[in-house]
């Protein structure tokens, strides 16, 4: 059962993160608007896109799920922060969709981080040696 729940959470978080990449990397007007509002256009748009791509890949690989979840929490925390401080819940009439998707990714990654904490600890131990 843990494996099924893990895959549902991993796929949900990764798919949400991956679907935003098209908009970030192609310079969609909505994406440019968001990053202009927070003073991070274009480097923030590309940087967050690369980070989200890496987090998604790590989430989908069994040996790095925990690391992907940790990275996912970090990346999506920035998005949630900007929604709550400068963008607002609703951006350009989206009804809050981007914010709610960010919350879903955050919750999925927090649960995955809890499930895979030993994996994260082992990876961090290897890195710091």
Image (tube, rainbow, N blue to C red):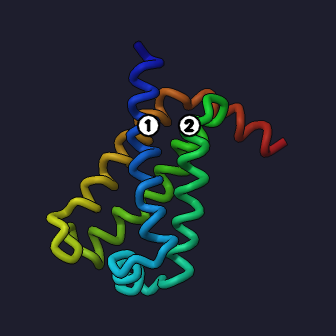
- Left or right: residue 26 versus residue 16 is right
Image vertical order of residue 81 relative to residue 73, above or below: below
Location of mark 1 (residue)? 11
Mark 2 neighbour density, 10 Å: few (under 14) some (14–19) many (20 or more): some
Location of mark 2 (residue)? 60
The residue at 31%/46% (across/down) is 104
Foreground residue, 126 or 34? 34
Q: Secondary structure at mark 1?
A: helix
Find the residue positioned furthest to the top. 1
Image vertical order of residue 51 relative to residue 60, above or below: below
- Left or right: residue 117 versus residue 90 is right
Q: Position of residue 38 (x, y in %)?
A: 39, 82
Badge 1 vs badge 2, beta-carbon distance below 8 Å = yes
Q: Position of residue 86 (x, y in %)?
A: 29, 79
Mark 1 neighbour density, 10 Å: few (under 14) some (14–19) many (20 or more): some
Image vertical order of residue 99 relative to residue 41, above or below: above
User: In which quarter of the view is residue 125 placed?
Assistant: top right
């Amino acid at each position: 059962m843990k494996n099924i729940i893990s895959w549902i959470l991993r796929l949900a978080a990764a798919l949400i993160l991956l679907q935003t990449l098209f908009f970030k990397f192609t310079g969609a007007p909505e994406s440019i608007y968001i990053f202009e509002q927070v003073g991070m256009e274009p480097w923030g748009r590309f940087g967050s896109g690369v980070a989200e791509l890496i987090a998604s890949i790590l989430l989908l690989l069994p040996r790095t799920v925990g690391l992907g979840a940790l990275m996912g929490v970090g990346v999506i925390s920035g998005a949630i922060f900007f929604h709550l401080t400068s963008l607002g819940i609703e951006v350009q009439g989206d009804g809050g969709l981007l914010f709610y998707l960010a919350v879903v990714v955050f919750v999925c990654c927090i649960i995955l981080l809890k499930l895979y904490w030993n994996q994260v600890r082992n990876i961090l131990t290897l890195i710091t040696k």
